[in-house]
Image: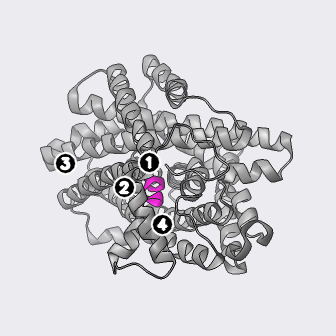
Amino acid sequence: MSVGPNLTPPTTVQSSNLDQRMTTRAQEVLSGGGRHHGWRRILPFFGPAFIASVAYMDPGNFATNIQGGAQFGYSLLWVVLLASLMAMLIQNLSAKLGIATGQNLPEVIRERWPRPLVWFYWVQAELVAMATDLAEFLGAALAIHLLTGLPMLWGAVVTAFITFSLLTLQKRGFRPLEIAIAVFVGVIGIAYLVQVILAKPGPEALTGFLPSFQGRESLYLAVGIIGATVMPHVIYLHSALTQGRIPTINDAEKKRLVRFNRIDVLVAMSLAALINMAMLASSAAAFHGKGVENAGDLTVAYQTLTPLLGPLAGLAFAVALLASGLSSSAVGTMAGQIVMQGFVRLQIPLWVRRVITMIPAFALILTGLNATNVLVVSQVILSFGIPFALVPLLMFTARKDVMGVLANDAAVTWTGWAIASVIIGLNFYLLWSTFIG
C-alpha cells in the first residue's frame, strides 16, 4: 500500500521492482510521454479502486442482496443500481482528495477540525470498522464451514490465518496487494456469472429497476443494501490508497492523474455493481415464489441451490462468499489502521488490530446467533455511519484552499449533497417507521 508524506505506514513497506516499474510508467504517461498505448497506457493507474471495490461486494452484500431477492424478487434491483451510482461519485471524490492534498480524509479532518470533534469522529469510525470487520469475518468463516464442513469456530480460525497471510503482502509494496485483491474480485465475478447462467433470470427482472417499496421490511433491506454498498470505512481508505501513490510535479499532472483514477473507479465500481445486481437477480430467480422457507439465510441458500440449480451453483456461491470474506476482511483491517493513524496518530501492529477486531466475531460464533441475521443488522449499522464520512468529504473536496485546482464544481457538489440527503433521509425514515410508525 502506498502512503503519502504525512502518514506513518502501518507496516514497513518496501517499494518492489513492480511498484517502481508501474510508477515510472505512470509518471511517463502523466508527463505526456511513454511508449505504451491503449489499455497498457491506463494499466499503471488501475489498483486503488479495485481494493476499494471489494468493500462493495463483501459478505454483507451477499446477505442483503440474497435476502432481498428471495423475499421481494427483482423489486429492489433499482436500489442496488442507485447505491452503485452513489458509490462511483463518492469513491471518485475520495481518490481525488488523496491526490490533491497528499493526505487521507482522517488526516484532513484532524488538521482542520476541533480536537473533541476529531476524537468523536475516531470513536464512531472505529465502531463502524468493528461492524464492517464482523460482517466480513463471519462471511468468510461461514463459507469455509459450507465448503468443508468445519465448525464455524474452526472456519474463523482458518479465516484469521489466511487474512494474516494476505496482509503481509503490504510489506512488498502496493502493487502485489492490488493484484491479489483484483484476483479475488475476478473469482467473485466468475462465480456470479456462473450463478446467473444457471439461475436464468427472466425479462421481468427489468421491472426491478422501477423505484418502489413493498412495506417496511423492504425499506429495511433497502437501507441495508445502501449500507452494504456505500461503505464508510472505504471512503476513508480510498483517499489513503491514492495519496502519494503516483507523485506529480504540477497541477497539470494532478488533473491528468485524476482523470486516470476516474477510469479506475468507473471500471472497478461498474464491475462491483454488476456483481451485486447478479446476486439479487439470481437469488430472485432461484428462490422467490418457489416456496423455499428462509431462502434469504445464506446457509439455507447454499443448501437449496444444489437441488434447485445443480451442484455447480452451490459451489460457485460458496467460493464467491469465501473470496469476498477473505479479501474484504484484509481491506477492512487496512481501513481501520488508516482511521486510527489519521484521526489520532495512534499506531499498533497490524496483527494486534486483526486480533482485536476478530474478538466480536468469535464471541458471536460461540453464542450461536444466526450469521445471516447478524450480517444484515451490521449493514444497517454501516448505513448510519455513511454521513459521518460523506459530509466532511463533500465539504473538503469543494474547498479550493484544500483541493486547489481539483476542487469540485457546483454540479458535483450539489449532486454529492443530494446523495447525502437521500441516505440520511432513508435512515431517519427507517428509525421513525421502526420505533414510532
Colouring scheme, one of rainbow, by chain, secondary structure, one colour: one colour
Of discs 1 and 3, which sits in the foreground?
1
Query: In 3D space, how far apart are the residues under numbered discs 3 and 2 (Cα atoms)?
Result: 37 Å
- Secondary structure, mark 1, is loop
- The residue pinned by badge 4 equals 265
The disc, 2 or 4, on the residue closer to the chain's N-terminal end is 2
- Secondary structure, mark 3, is helix
* Marking on residue 313: 3
Q: Is residue 252 above or below residue 184?
A: below
Of discs 3 and 4, which sits in the foreground?
4
The answer to whether residue 180 is left or right of residue 302 is right
Q: Amino acid at mark 3?
A: Ala
Q: Using the rendered view, name the quadrant where residue 90 is placed.
A: bottom right
The disc, 3 or 2, on the residue closer to the chain's N-terminal end is 2
Q: Amino acid at mark 2?
A: Leu
Residue 180, position in %: x, y? Answer: 34, 48
- The residue pinned by badge 1 equals 173
Q: Amino acid at mark 1?
A: Gly
